[in-house]
Amino acid sequence: MKGLADEPNHMIELLEGGTTLEDVIDGHVYEQALADKSVFVVSDLGSLMRQHVQWQRTMPQIRPFYPVKSNSSPAVIEILASLGLGFICANKAEVSLVLGHDVPPENIIFSGVCKQLSHIKHAAKNGVDLLVCDSETELCKIARSHPKAKLLVQVTTWAQAAETSMAFGCSLKSCRRLLEAAKDLGLQVVGATFHIPSSCKDLQAYSNALSDAHCVFDMGAELGFSMSILDIGGGFSGSEFQLKQVHTSVRLLLDASFPALSGVQVIAQPGSYYVSSAFTLAVNVIGKKVVARDWSCQAQEELTPDDEPEFLYYLNDGVYGSFSSKLLGSTIPAPAVLKRGSTAAEPVFSSSLWGPSCDGLDQVLEHCLLPELSPGDWLVFNNMGAAGLGGPSAIRPAVYHTVSTADWYTMQEAGIAVDNIMKNFSMVHYGA
Ligand SMILES: *Cc1c(COP(=O)(O)O)cnc(C)c1O
């Protein structure tokens, strides 16, 4: 199977009885401590299923399509495919990866507003017909190399424009021209898509985007297109609270403008929602400096006995590795310290965390409160599943996949086909 080569570890540890993720991390830290203390990642694959159950309970009428760029770990793709999700792919490699997991091509949307010609041809050859498009240049490329494509028009939202400071998508004004051009080229338009990033706290963004999408549907229908897919994008943090909030703000508008009876299929692109909480990253402290608190404002950096100390810790991974999302503006959650023998409450100090590159940009966390650490201590970062762990170019940390026996049985009882997972991964029992 394609894709697995990226991940040396084709093993899923089945956690027995009361074995917790912490036990697994402890176990690997012990192994690592004997070896070279390299960064590693532990997954809880059951979390993918629990997020899915929560999605279906809260948003049953909206079908999730998972954006592969959020986390392309083969185990994630395999499980989400068994759960019946569709997939959003941004390039040929992602399309090949997903097809390699036996996902039918009609469950794949080729997104991305600029596509390489050879990638469009690859989609055409493999029967991936749903393509996102936002400009006439793209239309011309698609008409030439994928005449049977079914297009989703990417409509711009101010929330996305504000976040990326880039004009993604087509403004409502240009949409008519785009639809007419598609018609002239003999292409088929089947719907609209938009994206509101989770950083956008103003739920009004959804009403605006839905009303824009409704205009696009009307224009499409006028031109004779059969508009049948509405995609409301990603931006779901993973919390049930936020999911319910979004659901409340879209439900009435969806019922009014895109009723199920009209035959419109509503889909979404939850990325972080599925994977964020499923991955935990463990990194090692490799260096330490102590300075006077607020040293940056003082001329002299010597610590006097009256000064409260502030600690700078250097980690064996930074923004050029597993914390690459920091460079894209994400906030890294504060870590936990792996238990170190003494359980007594320790005093905490103002601390900052740095990557190993000695580059001023390589700051993982500007400020957090931690007990005093020493080189060799381990820090554990939760909710790292959507952080693009390792990134495509960096050295990927070792990944240890786990699933609790309870979650594993629940998946089987829920009728989720686990055959493919069993075929492609070896399940090993962990704990007693
Ligand atoms: C990254 C991305 C997503 C996923 O966003 P989340 O906020 O992680 O859900 C969805 N759609 C598009 C187009 C994306 O680029």
Image (cartoon, rainbow, N blue to C red):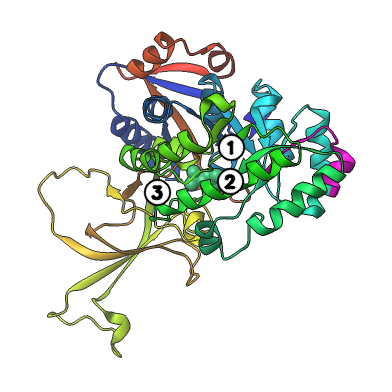
Q: Are marks 1 and 2 in contact (CB under 8 Å)?
A: yes
| Vertical order, 319 against 37 (above or below) | below
Where residue 87 sits in the image (x, y, percent)?
A: 60, 32
Amino acid type at image mark 3: Val
- For the record, the magenta segment spans 140-152
Where residue 301 sits in the image (x, y, percent)?
A: 29, 84
Residue 226 relative to residue 79: left or right: right
| Vertical order, 108 against 182 (above or below) | above
Amino acid type at image mark 1: Leu
Q: Nearer the viewer, residue 271 or 217?
A: 217
Identity of the residue drawn at 82% across and 43% down: 183
Disc 2 is placed on an element classified as helix
| Vertical order, 360 against 253 (above or below) | below
Disc 1 is placed on an element classified as strand
The picture quadrant where one finds residue 98 is top right
Q: Nearer the viewer, mark 3 or mark 2?
A: 2
Residue at the outermost front position:
222
Ligand 1 near label 1 (Cβ, under 8 Å)?
Answer: no
Give the labeled residue for mark 1.
Answer: 230
Residue 146 within the segment the image draws in magenta: yes
